[in-house]
Image: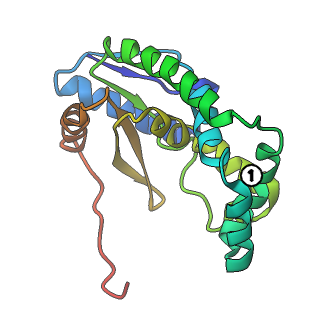
Amino acid sequence: HAAICLRPGGLQIAKEVEDALLDAARRLVDAGWTVEEIDDVPAIREAAQLQERLWLGDGFGALADMVASDGDPGAHAVVAAARLKVKDLPADVISRSLVRRTTLLRQWRLFLDQYAVVLMPVSSELPFPDDLDMQGAAGFDRVWEAQLTMRALPAMGLPGLAVTTQLVDGVPVGVQIVAAHFREDLCLLAGEAIEARGAPASPVDPDC
């Protein structure tokens, strides 16, 4: 029994992403799975915020100094965007976040007792143009929002598998398969069923 959530946390997704998710669900049904469409998953935006606080809540000043001395423009863009997120964090943000994380873990464990796997977007958009996150606050925020699931799920240590199902104008698109803790086997089982029903060719450029 699987679930599909098209818009976790109210995420707005591109039509191509939605089409790929629905296609993946149809493939699982064809393979004998039962797939239920659900409106949302537990507290995914709060999980993303916890991940952000655990990343940034300790040692940000030292990190910013290292980035400044290194001079890498990509790292500088991340630090610049994160600085506003850090300035109002309480001194005990790490301990608070870890305590709250246990509550979210329980919510997800209960949720995943109902479903073997959940299908979700990898990103709400197709792959971005190069260096979009370095083109000012708007570009960074667009990438940050689109990658909600990639930020939230690691906070809870949940296994996930991305499967490409098609190409849109040469750009890969597919689905993210999420399962309960220590159930990577279910991700692989569902991924195998989806991929067996058609995967795009991945030619290798010999000059790369």
Q: Quadrant location of residue 180? A: top left
The amino acid beneath tag 1 is Ala
Residue 187 position, x and y percent, is: 26, 35
Q: In front here: 102 or 114?
A: 102
Residue 66 position, x and y percent, is: 68, 71
Q: Which residue is mark 1?
A: 82
Residue 105 position, x and y percent, is: 45, 22
At horizontal 38% and vertical 84% (from top left) the residue drawn is 208
Can the viewer see residue 166 in this picture? yes
In this rendering, position of residue 157 left or right of residue 102: left
At horizontal 70% and vertical 55% (from top left) the residue drawn is 60
Residue 138 position, x and y percent, is: 79, 52
In this rendering, position of residue 41 left or right of residue 50: left
Of the 4 image quadrants, the one containing the N terminus is: top left
In this rendering, position of residue 24 left or right of residue 130: left
At horizontal 77% and vertical 64% (from top left) the residue drawn is 135
Scheme by which the image is coloured: rainbow
In this rendering, position of residue 54 left or right of residue 114: right
Can the viewer see residue 45 in this picture? no
Q: For the residue labelled by badge 1, is the local secondary structure a helix, a strand or a loop?
A: helix
Against 70, residue 60 (above or below) is: above
Q: In front here: 133 or 152?
A: 152
At horizontal 31% and vertical 13% (from top left) the residue drawn is 113
